[in-house]
Amino acid sequence: MDSIVIEGGVPLRGEIQIHGAKNAALLLQCAALLAQGTTTLRHVPLLSDVRTMNRLLTHLGCRVEGERTLAIDTSGVAEGPLSAPYELVKTMRASVTVMGPLLARYGRARVSLPGGCAIGARPIDQHLKGLAALGAEIELDHGYVVARAKRLTGANFVFDKVTVGGTQNVMMAATLARGTTVLENAAREPEVQELAIVLNKMGARIRGAGTSVIEIEGVDELHPVDHAILPDRIEAGTYAVAAIITGGDVLLRDAPVDHMHAVLAKLEEAGAELRVEPAGLRVRSSGTLRPIDVSTRPHPGFPTDMQAQIMVLASCAPGRSVISETIFENRFMHVPELLRMGADVTVNGSTAVVRGPTRYLGTTVMATDLRASASLVLAGLVAEGRTEIRRVYHLDRGYEAVERKLAPLGARITRYHDARA
Ligand code: EPZ
């Protein structure tokens, strides 16, 4: 397993190219199943999660070619068993969002229940309830969801709670249903909006994506598209924190500023200087950091995927910051590792009290989940001495070549393959 070693203390200067959004790419890979023929996705991030989704699409009978530009040919899908096996779903839970497209297009799907993950139980009850509302017959069979539908029928459905994947799964299914579907209490994330934009390019009739009420008028078929994926707001937010805490000056090329208002507001509150430029977002520290209170919320609130990263920023500021995680029940896995590097964080249920400024000291730490590992990289960038982060496969799920993006800005960062851990 790879590890990454960082010698901290260098202000980052230069520019970073922000790549396509992971959480858009994965869903657009699923959406390709809704059309017969070859869908082309561009600006695809080179991530292990994207490769896992490609393995699933291939397993389903697709022919997948390319990496940054991905061509997904669905011509060979109809005959297959249309199952998403445990080994793949366990690796990447976003696999469950093939269910909606398979049901809509082929009338059947057999998808492993994802099980929990490091950050929480993450059930899919809302996905299943929404698909059942469209007329799908759903049954559980030895850890698998078996879903069938001759043809889905449009319906009105209110989510019991806001779910990004649930909204996307049911929205995709509704595109080929007979009649109109209205989803209420829908997720408003930019990746939901991006999916609706692409589905409409494929011939769907969706209105209201980005609000909590989405209306989908069913059509008979969708056609393949060629689409360039929007940049990753979480990757951009992560590197913005790196620029601020190292006292650097970084241009985040193509950063999707319009989808980052909550994050940018908090960064400015914490003492960042932000400037929107034609090429992207320029980020530097004002030299004085201030404590901040953050509560994660569904979009357009502060994203849970930036919680671990903003905690490191807060820990670098003098004073007391309070961070509440309201989306997932176990998303403070980064705290024990940050404590080992010298942070002062007290967790009480879903709230963490952070006291700073922290004098981070390098040591060996273990990555546990995607965004937790990003926070360890951030702490390593400001720590005195050498930080070794082990099990960076967690990081590689959502961040493309971190060491290659940071080294040109002055970071002393090296990846070791097949490290000891
Ligand atoms: C998406 O996960 C993202 N993943 C996550 O990003 C992100 O953290 C999350 O949305 C919240 O923004 C992808 O887009 C691939 P949810 P998703 O359904 O769709 C509960 C990352 O770091 N829930 O919005 O799985 C669930 O347990 C990843 O890039 C139900 O109870 O998240 C959670 O507490 C991590 N029943 C809350 O809702 C359901 O049927 C939000 O989950 C579905 C969800």
Image: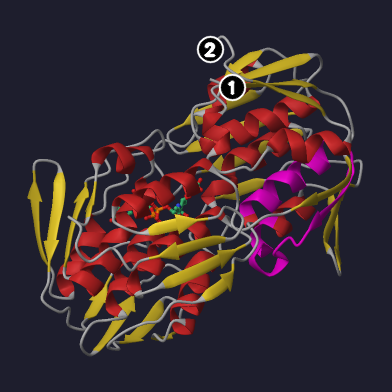
Name the residue beneath numbered marker 1.
2
The part of the image, by quadrant, that contains residue 392 is top right
Name the residue beneath numbered marker 2.
421
Q: Is residue 65 above or below residue 78?
A: above
Task: Judge from the rendering whether residue 10 lies leftward or rightward of residue 6; answer left or right.
Answer: right
Q: Earlier in the sequence, mark 1 or mark 2?
A: 1
Measured from the top left, where is residue 126 in percent x and y? 25, 60
Q: Which residues are magenta?
A: 234-263
Classify mark 1: helix, strand or loop. loop
State how far apart marks 1 and 2 are (Cα): 8 Å
Q: Is residue 41 above or below residue 239?
A: below
Badge 1 amino acid: Asp
Measured from the top left, where is residue 81 in percent x and y? 17, 55
The tally of labels here is 2
Can the viewer see residue 300 in this picture?
A: no
Measured from the top left, where is residue 267 in percent x and y? 75, 51
Badge 2 amino acid: Ala
Say which residue appears at 89% left-offset and 34% top-offset: 11
Say which residue appears at 49% left-offset and 27% top-offset: 368
